[in-house]
Amino acid sequence: MNFEKTEVVGGDKALVGIVMGSGSDWPELGHASETLLALGIPHERFVISAHRTPDRCADYAQSAKKRGIRAIIAAAGMAAHLPGVLAASTSVPVIGVPMATTMMGGLDSLLSMVQMPKGIPVATMSIGKHGAINAAIFCARMMAHDSPDIEEKLEAYVAKMADESAKQQPWNSK
Ligand code: RP5
């Protein structure tokens, strides 16, 4: 099964799919895309809703493996079913990113996502930007073993982070 064509960021063939329940999730999911790019992982991006476009959601999940997608980062807020619904229709690992909400700060999204019953796992990250960035790094960790380029970029990313952390002197900043 083919899914609709889209722009691939950072290469010719996407290895990771970033899927979000609404365009309103993009400000946080943009960090996942940026981080995947920094780690040399080509990816695609779609707005797909488990509730508003359920058939499209099933089509995406069912086509993902055949199209070469090796991990799906799925973000949603409120009753955040998207990662679980995608995971139900594919064997590709799904990494869930709960979105912050104005009503409950994202605890609603987190609990909807993390409490998957046995059999269909979703690897749930932390809420919002931190989870989006960690989802991308988690993809790199899964893929580094098979890709010296991703491994090298991941090592450089971690080394840069450590360097920046060790150099911090907040008492000297104005
Ligand atoms: C979820 O509902 C989306 O993932 C989003 O976080 C939330 C609100 O969606 P919008 O009303 O902003 O489109 O499905």
Image (cartoon, grey):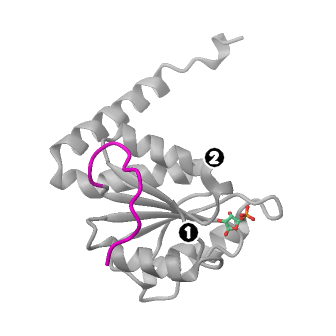
Gap between marks 1 and 2 measured at Cα:
16 Å
Q: Is residue 79 left or right of residue 73?
A: right
Secondary structure of the residue carrying numbered label 2:
helix
Where residue 152 appears, x then y in whole percent?
22, 37
Residue at the far right: name it.
Answer: 103
Q: Which mark is residue 48?
A: 1
What residue is drawn where x is 55% and y is 68%?
Answer: 48
Relative depth, front residue between 111 and 168: 111
* Mark 1: C-beta under 8 Å from nearest atom of ligand 1: no
Residue 40 lies, in percent from the top left, at 30, 41
Figure check: 119 above or below 16: below
The residue identified by callout 2 is 27
Q: Name which of mark 1 and mark 2 comes first in the sequence.
A: 2
Q: In the image, which residues are magenta?
A: 1-13
Compared with 7, 49 (above or below) is below
Residue 27: percent from left, percent from top: 63, 46
Relative depth, front residue between 67 and 91: 67
Ligand 1 closer than 8 Å to label 2 CB: no
Q: Which quadrant would the C terminus be assigned to in this image? A: top right
Q: Main secondary structure of the magenta part?
A: loop
The crowding category of the residue bearing disc 2, from other C-alpha atoms within 10 Å (few below 14, some 14 to 19, many at least 20), is few
Quadrant housing the N terminus: bottom left
In this orientation, which residue lies closer to the viewer: 125 or 66?
66
Residue ID at (47%, 77%): 86
Q: Locate residue 26, reporting x and y percent.
A: 61, 51
Q: What residue appears at the point 52 percent right and 73 percent down from the top-left corner?
A: 83
Amino acid marked by disc 1: Ile
